[in-house]
Amino acid sequence: MKRIVTFIVALALCGGVYAQDFGFGLRLGGNFSQIDGDMASGYNKIGYHIGIFTSYPFGSVSSANLELSYSSKGARNTEIQQVTVLDYVEISLLYGIKLTEKIEILAGIQPSVLTNLSVTEGGVDKGEIFDYKKLDIPVAIGLRLYLNPHIAIEGRLSYSLPSISKIGNAKGLLGNYYGQFNNVLSGSLIYKL
C-alpha cells in the first residue's frame, strides 16, 4: 500500500514537468460505500481514495480525463457485525464537460482490480466464503467545483456494471442478472499542478 501511494505521488509530481496541454494533479478523499445485494443497506462503510490524474482539453468546454487511484470500498452490516473491505487499484476514463467556468460534469468508466479482500463477522475472518471477482467495471458520474485554478472539490457516484459476486439478490443496472454490486459515493479534494 505504501509503495502504491508513493508511486502515485511521484508520478504526479514528475508529470507536470514536461506537459504543455495536459493538466496533471492529485485526488484525495473519502468513500461512503455499500454493496447492493448483500442484505444490508446504507452507505455505512467509510473508506478512502488517493490518486493522480491527467486531463487533456478539447477546446474550452470539454476534456478527456485519465486517473490512477487506490480506493477502499466495501460494506458494514451492524446487525450481524460484518465488515467487508474491498481495496482496488482503479483506472478511471472520464469525459468532462464544463457547464460554467467553475463547474464541470464528469462521466465514464472505472475499471478496477481487487488488491485486498477482508470479510469479518464478529471479528472472525469469513473472506474465503465470498467469491468476489478480481475485476470490477463501475460506471461513474461526478460534479467538480473549481474553487480556483488549482483547487477543486468533487462529488462522484460509481456503480458496478457487472456483478462483483454472483452471491446476492440485487439486480444490476443492465437488468439482466442478479448478484452483488459496489455502490460508492465519494467526495474528493483535487489539486491541479
Image (cartoon, grey):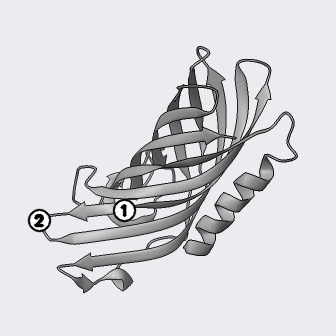
Position of 23 compared to 136: left or right?
A: right
Please determine whether, in this image, residue 9 is positioned above or below residue 42.
Answer: below
Quadrant in the rendering for residue 131: bottom left
Q: Quadrant location of the C terminus?
A: top right
Q: Residue at x 73, y 58 (%)?
A: 11
Q: Give the mark nearest the N terminus, 2 or 1.
A: 1
Helix, strand or loop at mark 2 = loop
* Viewer-proximal residue among 11 and 114: 11
* Viewer-proximal residue among 188 and 82: 188
Picture mark count? 2
Helix, strand or loop at mark 1 = strand
* Viewer-proximal residue among 153 and 166: 153
Residue 123 appears anywhere in the view: yes
Q: Amino acid at mark 2?
A: Glu
Q: Quadrant location of the N terminus?
A: bottom right
**Residue 52 locus on image (x, y percent):** 65, 51
Q: Residue at x 54, y 32 (%)?
A: 152
Q: Which residue is mark 1?
A: 74
Q: CA distance from mark 2 to mark 1?
A: 16 Å
**Residue 40 locus on image (x, y percent):** 21, 58
Position of 146 compared to 25: left or right?
A: left
Question: Tag 2: Cα neighbours inside 10 Å, few (<14), some, or many (≥20)?
Answer: few
User: Residue lying furthest top in this view?
Assistant: 100
Please determine whether, in this image, residue 106 is positioned above or below residue 137.
Answer: above
Quadrant in the rendering for residue 55: top right
Residue 178 appears anywhere in the view: no
Please determine whether, in this image, residue 95 is positioned above or below residue 170.
Answer: above
* Viewer-proximal residue among 31 and 161: 31
**Residue 15 locus on image (x, y percent):** 79, 51
| Residues under numbered marks 2 and 1 in contact, where contact means CB atoms less than 8 Å apart | no
Numbered circle sitting on residue 79: 2
**Residue 104 locus on image (x, y percent):** 58, 24
